């Protein structure tokens, strides 16, 4: 593939003041995308210094065009072109004073290049574009979709909630496995054994009231409990376990925070003693 040598002055916005002049070798594919992103960045600057800045429509349209470049030029590119583009964007963003990490996703890099925004704002816009992609929203429909969703902040809120829900569901599923394993062990070594006439079926449900001395009084029973009900109970037990784990972790963190100053002081004293 033929390479084109482009200076940062050609691809980094002309408005960037006192930007270091470096020479970055871009592939033809990367050069085309960088030029499009550069044009969008210029549009962004015009939007920010005019009354257009106050209009969500301008922001939505810019995000839509950014998504269009991402879908049209990056998603379907070859692995070699994708790697080349990421390297080029990393170098060009560095020239702009934007820190890029190895795990920074390409969509976020697109946003940082176009908007030149702070990290938090850029990740917020990336959240929005990721949400649009996950819902199959085309670039041309992004503005209308954002309006229908209640705006950028609402989409971000839902996206964060979704990620938290996924994390919680994974924790509950892991806890359910542990609960089921403990139930299988308890069939061999029961927690307790009671004899109540009339009980039948694979599972029975017992309702008991605990007392202060640690004993429990069975006050009702239900035979032939459906398997679906057993699964619901297991899920409930798993959720309780996850909640307890979170509470224990919070207590441990608070205790660690309280002890941190004392530990630091002890460490310093030990260093002084060692030096002496």
Image (tube, rainbow, N blue to C red):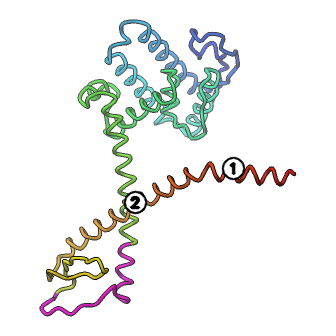
Mark 1 and mark 2 residues within 8 Å of each other at the beta carbon: no
The residue segment tinted magenta is: 179-200
Give the structural element (helix, strand or loop) at label 1: helix
Q: Nearer the viewer, residue 242 or 9?
A: 242
- Marking on residue 171: 2
Count of numbered tags: 2
Element type at mark 2: helix
Q: How far is the residue under mark 1 from the one under mark 2?
A: 37 Å
210 relative to 179 in the view: left or right: left
Would you place residue 167 above or below residue 228 in this image? above
Badge 1 density bin: few <14, some 14–19, many ≥20, Cα 10 Å: few
Badge 2, how many Cα within 10 Å: few under 14, some, many 20+? some
Magenta-span inclusion, residue 183: yes
Where residue 109 sits: x, y (%)?
52, 30
| Rendered-image quadrant of the N terminus | top right
Tell me which residue sits at (30%, 80%) in the image: 213
Q: Quadrant of residue 63?
A: top left
- The picture places residue 228, in percent across and down from the top left corner, at 20, 71
Left or right: residue 267 versus residue 190 is right
Which residue lies at the image location 34% right of the left edge and 37% below the top edge?
A: 157
Mark earlier in primary sequence (1, 2): 2
Q: Quadrant of residue 222?
A: bottom left
- In the picture as drawn, the residue positioned furthest to the left comes out as 198
Task: Name the foreground residue: 151 vs 74.
Answer: 151
Residue 265 — which label? 1
> Residue at the location (40% across, 6% down)?
50
Q: Foreground: 32 or 261?
A: 261
Q: Nearer the viewer, mark 1 or mark 2?
A: 1
């Amino acid at each position: 593939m033929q390479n084109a040598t482009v200076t940062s002055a050609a691809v980094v916005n002309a408005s960037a003041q006192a930007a270091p002049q470096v020479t970055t070798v871009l592939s033809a594919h990367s050069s085309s995308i960088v030029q499009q992103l550069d044009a969008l960045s210029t549009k962004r600057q015009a939007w920010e210094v005019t009354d257009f800045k106050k209009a969500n429509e301008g922001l939505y349209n810019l995000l839509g065009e950014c998504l269009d470049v991402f879908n049209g030029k990056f998603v379907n590119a070859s692995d070699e072109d994708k790697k080349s583009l990421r390297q080029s964007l990393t170098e060009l963003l560095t020239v702009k004073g934007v820190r890029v990490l190895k795990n920074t996703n390409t969509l976020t890099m697109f946003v940082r290049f176009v908007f030149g925004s702070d990290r938090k704002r850029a990740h917020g816009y990336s959240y929005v574009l990721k949400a649009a992609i996950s819902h199959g929203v085309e670039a041309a429909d992004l503005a209308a979709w954002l309006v229908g969703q209640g705006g950028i902040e609402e989409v971000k809120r839902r996206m964060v909630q979704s990620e938290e829900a996924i994390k919680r569901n994974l924790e509950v599923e892991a806890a359910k496995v542990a609960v089921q394993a403990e139930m299988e062990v308890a069939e061999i070594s029961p927690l307790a054994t009671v004899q109540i006439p009339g009980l039948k079926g694979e599972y029975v449900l017992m309702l008991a009231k605990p007392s202060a001395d640690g004993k429990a009084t069975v006050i009702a029973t239900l035979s032939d409990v459906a398997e679906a009900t057993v699964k619901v109970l297991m899920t409930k037990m798993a959720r309780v376990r996850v909640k307890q784990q979170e509470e224990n972790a919070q207590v441990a963190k608070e205790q660690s925070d309280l002890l941190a100053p004392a530990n630091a002081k002890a460490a310093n004293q030990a260093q002084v003693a060692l030096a002496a």
